[in-house]
Amino acid sequence: MVRVRPMNLRLDGEAVLALQQETYCANFPGFQYGIEFEREFSRQLRHAERPDREELFVAEMNGQVVGFLWMGTLLAEFSPEPVQAIVKNVSVAPERRRQGIGRLLIQHGESWAMAQGARRVRLQVTVSNAAAVALYHDLGYSVDRYEMTKPLGSVSESGGLTPNG
């Protein structure tokens, strides 16, 4: 049985970091996972663990962390819904995917968001992550904005930018 509970950084931090390597490498081509990423991610987790507008959760099965959810709220001053929630990070252990854990985490996050006064949840997902896109659609999420990127060039050996194209 899977249980979602608040994350305890001291107890769960290492397991959550382990989930991030696969998640980031799979979703961001060329991403280099290393000690600098671990330090920065750990710093951000410590900050998020403080009681303010963020909450960290883990999914636990048989005493092991098998999933992670990082929720936050933001104030959208010029929106009809001034308090919105955002899924900052969700990850599930590869061997535990397609078992309903991601769905359970997101639904838990939605309940948390409603308790914070939010009436809308936002998230970003990598286009190539078809399983996650399908899950979010199944949970009722829809596309209402596009984020577009354009590579500007690469850094040459001399340190300058080399234009693409």
Image (spheres, grey):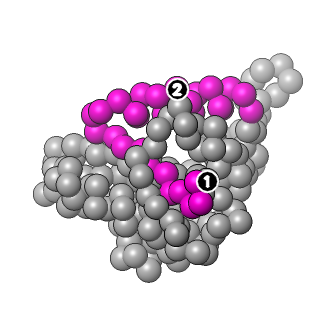
The magenta segment: 34-63
Q: Secondary structure at mark 2?
A: helix
Residue 126 seen in this snapshot: no
Residue at 46% from the left image edge and 70% from the top image edge:
103
Find residue 98 and name its label. none
What distance separates the C-alpha of mark 1 from that of mark 2?
A: 23 Å
Q: Does the magenta portion include 57?
A: yes
Q: Which residue is mark 1?
A: 64
Q: Nearest to the eye among marks 1 and 2: give it.
A: 1
Residue farthest toward the left in the current orientation of the protein: 80
Other residues around mark 1 within 10 Å, as few (<14) / some (14–19) / many (≥20): few
Residue 143 in the image, given as x and y percentages of width and height: 40, 69
Of mark 1 and mark 2, the one earlier in the sequence is 2
Residue at 53 percent across and 57 percent down: it is 60
The percent coordinates of residue 108 (x first, y second) are 36, 61
Q: Which mark is residue 43?
A: 2
Q: Is residue 1 above or below residue 91?
A: below
The residue drawn where x is 29% and y is 33% is 51
